[in-house]
Amino acid sequence: MQRAFGTAVAPAPSTRKKTAARVALVDLKESTRFLLTECFRQFGIEAVVTSASSAERLCQEKFEACVLNLGPDAEKIMQAARSSRSNSRLILYGVGGSAQEAMRYSKFGINAMFQEPVERPAALKLVRATHMLILHEFRRYVRIPIMTEVTVISDDGHRLSASSIEVSSGGMSLKSAEDMPSGTSIEVSFSLLSLPRVSVRGVVTWRKSKSFGLHFDSADDRRHKIKQWIDAYLES
């Protein structure tokens, strides 16, 4: 009887699913950590709180993403992540000032920015827009969010500076304070992490307030370098 009773009440094996991915929250305010933890949790992503002095964790442990404060230690943290074999392609979020300020770290390829003060609607919108990359659902996400400096030159020789928002094998979206009308033929020049500076021609296909979209010229073979980089980025 005792044996039968013991068998009946033995706990069943745990069926809880393992977390699909982890995001490191580095040197963030408590309120920001709490908010982002809840946002990432909605998409099955575990948030791991770390300090600015624990850069070695990004060399020793595997993370799919990292959110860090763009403070004095930001460069050290990003260098540790990008130089790590397991984390060199992790999705990198900055928390802090404007996109222009984030350009100081463009060589590290920040993917997206949480603007301070971090508010739930905007934070959730950004996580929703990028979580497919964190979860490696690449077939459903062919655009790579990444922030880097871009030089834009129009056919009449006018030159302006912009920052990238997203890039795909067929084009990219950019942020710029200067107007760039739809239909304008331009050449853009930029670099992406392991991709040396590349130039490619294209046509502006849409314009919104302080941003515009570019479709790469299918006759410009230089665009193949961008496609190769994206393929490698998604496969890593």
Image (cartoon, rainbow, N blue to C red):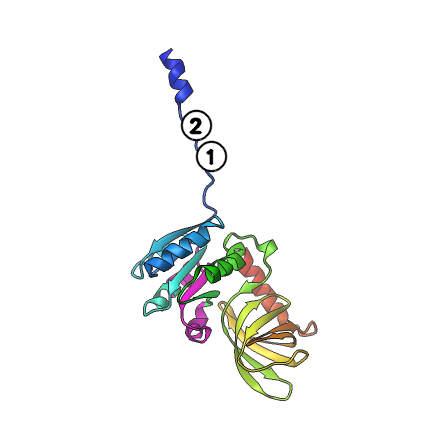
Which one is in front, 85 or 70?
70
* Residue occupying image coordinates x 53% and y 53%: 136
Q: Is residue 9 magenta?
A: no
Q: Is residue 136 left or right of residue 80?
A: right
Span shown in magenta: 79-108
Magenta stretch encompasses residue 86: yes
Residue 217 got which mark?
none
Residue 151 against residue 122 in the figure, above or below: below
Q: Determine the secondary structure under disc 1.
A: loop
Which disc is residue 12 wearing? Answer: 2
Amino acid type at image mark 2: Ala
* Residue 232 rendering spot, x and y as whole percentages: 55, 60
Quadrant containing the N terminus is top left
Cβ atoms at labels 1 and 2 below 8 Å apart: yes
The tag on residue 15 is 1
Crowding at mark 2 (Cα within 10 Å: few <14, some 14-19, many 20+): few
Q: Amino acid at mark 1?
A: Thr
Looking at the rendered structure, the secondary structure element under dot 2 is loop
Side (left or right) of 153 relative to 29: right
**Residue lying at the far left of the rendered structure:** 53
